[in-house]
């Protein structure tokens, strides 16, 4: 695969699946039935599903073939050793443990590494990462770089960690409570923005200087590597695989949801160099996930994950991911809707707060836009705003609001064509022309953590 400039998908379609096409009335009834929580919609009620890129990609013929050869032995299967060899060659870590997905990797790692009162620093924690830190009675602190605050800037590495703030934290009064620094590549909670190798190198140096381990949240490591080869001096002549290998070796370990850049429906892993930490993780893994050579996965899943990790750094595959994201970004901008710039590969983030200025944060403009996209076009997406990050008192008055009201359009791998993304642009154009008719929502019930997954809501009547 040369990775030469392309304007078509570098694959042909061998198997197809019908998608549902519903009426507006059916979608309106579905929204009422699920109390306006898009997570509770049935898949058969969704025409284009951009809720997540996690486990929603299309497998390659080579992955399916690898799955057929899966060895389902309980211990020491051929599938495990193929997986282990693939991950070890990619990351260089001395110890590799499979898990059934990324949040399992987070739970096992944090439960083994943290103690109550510990602090975890990150460029930005995503939802389950933060939850797994807090479930261990620890504190998650985000240190996004200053450039991340300007959603319209086309600075290429807005996923970076703030190095000055990192140094301040590592030398400050809470320094002895800092147990780990996590670098998420790409920075999902920060708008899908990449991290530069320069920033990662300086972060690694600071962590070594102050004796704090550095771990990567590597769910989208290949897409981060692709953007590095496009935009960072000194890496333009490198392959994505070479960049990825260097990034892993700068860190002390990683946790990964392979449902993203492993291009599989289930799977993940933890990698690390510390033998004592690895032993603690392995014991917890065996007790709660499965034996150390399967980690809660079937052998076929391990084989498909190994194949996916080999395919994901192919330049032609990544070039097409970037091309399709740019195509959708053009359609969205043409519709009159702003996005977090510049567009990455795995998702576009719509600036719902700017499109719907008449809705205050505690009426959840991001969620309101997501619901209207489903109602008008059968498109499911995810809010990343005050429903996700905010807090209210018992009367619904805001205590804390998100810094930005966003909607994430996550792009499944090798699933939708340009005509599907054109439909999204057309739907947004229709909404933008009547944006002032979009009403807000209030929460009627919520859980104490990760409330956006299970909250129930109701519409707020339009003023006047």
Image: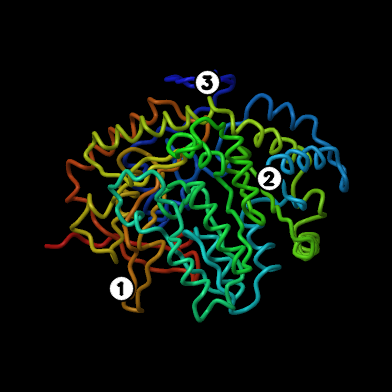
- Marks 2/1: CA distance? 44 Å
Say whether residue 320 is left or right of residue 76. Answer: left
- Marks 3/1: CA distance? 48 Å
Q: Position of residue 144 (x, y in %)?
A: 42, 60
Q: Which circle marks residue 91 in the picture?
A: 2
In this orientation, which residue lies closer to the viewer: 104 or 156? 156
- Marks 2/3: CA distance? 26 Å
Q: Earlier in the sequence, mark 3 or mark 1?
A: 3
Q: Secondary structure at mark 3?
A: loop
Assess disc 1: are there few (<14), some (14-19) or many (≥20) residues with their C-alpha within 10 Å of its C-alpha. Answer: some
* Quadrant in the picture for residue 27: top left
Q: Residue at x 59, y 21 (%)?
A: 1
Q: Position of residue 93 (x, y in %)?
A: 73, 50
Judging from the image, the colouring scheme is rainbow
Judge whether residue 49 can be spotted in this image. Answer: no
Q: Residue at x 65, y 76 (%)?
A: 115
Q: Which residue is mark 1?
A: 398
In this orientation, which residue lies closer to the viewer: 324 or 375? 324
Q: Which circle marks residue 244 in the picture?
A: none
User: Up-down: is 195 above or below 363?
Assistant: above
Q: Nearer the viewer, mark 2 or mark 3?
A: 2
Judge whether residue 364 can be spotted in this image. Answer: yes
Q: Position of residue 352 (x, y in %)?
A: 28, 51
Q: Secondary structure at mark 1?
A: strand
In this orientation, which residue lies closer to the viewer: 163 or 59? 163
Say whether residue 11 is left or right of residue 268. Answer: left
Q: Nearer the viewer, mark 2 or mark 1?
A: 2
Q: Which residue is mark 3?
A: 10
Q: Residue at x 44, y 51 (%)?
A: 159
């Amino acid at each position: 695969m040369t990775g030469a400039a392309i304007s078509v998908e570098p694959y042909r379609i061998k198997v197809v699946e019908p998608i549902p096409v519903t009426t507006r009335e059916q979608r309106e009834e579905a929204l009422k039935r699920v109390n306006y929580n898009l997570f509770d919609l049935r898949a058969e009620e969704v025409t284009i599903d951009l809720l997540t890129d996690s486990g929603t990609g299309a497998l390659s013929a080579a992955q399916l073939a690898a799955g057929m050869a899966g060895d389902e032995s309980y211990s020491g299967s051929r599938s495990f050793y193929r997986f282990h060899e693939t991950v070890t060659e990619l990351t260089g870590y001395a110890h590799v443990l499979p898990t059934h997905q990324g949040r399992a990797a987070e739970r096992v790692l944090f439960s083994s590494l943290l103690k109550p009162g510990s602090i975890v620093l990150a460029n930005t924690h995503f939802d389950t990462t933060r939850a797994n830190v807090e479930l261990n009675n620890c504190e998650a602190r985000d240190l996004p770089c200053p450039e991340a605050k300007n959603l319209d800037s086309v600075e290429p590495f807005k996923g970076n960690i703030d190095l000055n703030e990192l140094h301040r934290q590592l030398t400050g009064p809470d320094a002895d409570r800092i147990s780990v620094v996590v670098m998420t590549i790409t920075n999902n909670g920060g708008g899908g923005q990449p991290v530069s190798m320069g920033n990662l190198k300086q972060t690694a140096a600071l962590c070594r200087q102050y004796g704090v381990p550095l771990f990567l949240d590597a769910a989208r490591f290949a897409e981060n590597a692709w953007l590095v080869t496009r935009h960072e001096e000194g890496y333009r002549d490198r392959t994505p695989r070479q960049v990825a290998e260097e990034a892993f070796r700068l860190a002390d370990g990683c946790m990964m949801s392979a449902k993203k850049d492993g291009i599989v429906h289930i799977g993940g892993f933890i990698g690390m160099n510390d033998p004592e930490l690895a032993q603690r993780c392995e014991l917890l893994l065996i007790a709660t996930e499965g034996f150390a050579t399967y980690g809660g996965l079937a052998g076929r899943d391990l084989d498909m994950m190994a194949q996916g990790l080999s395919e994901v750094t192919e330049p032609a595959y990544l070039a097409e991911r970037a091309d399709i994201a740019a195509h959708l970004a053009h359609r969205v901008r043409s519709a009159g809707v702003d996005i977090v710039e510049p567009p990455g590969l795995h998702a576009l983030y719509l600036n719902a707060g700017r499109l719907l200025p008449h809705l205050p944060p505690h009426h959840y403009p991001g969620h309101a836009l997501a619901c209207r996209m489903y109602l008008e076009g059968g498109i499911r997406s995810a809010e990343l705003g005050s429903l996700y990050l905010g807090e209210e008192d018992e009367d619904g008055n805001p205590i804390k609001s998100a810094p930005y009201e966003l909607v994430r359009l996550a792009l499944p791998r090798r699933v939708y064509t340009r005509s599907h993304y054109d439909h999204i642009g057309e739907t947004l154009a229709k909404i933008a022309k009547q944006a002032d008719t979009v009403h807000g929502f209030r929460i009627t019930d919520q859980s104490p953590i990760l409330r956006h997954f299970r909250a129930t809501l109701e519409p707020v009547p339009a003023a006047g």
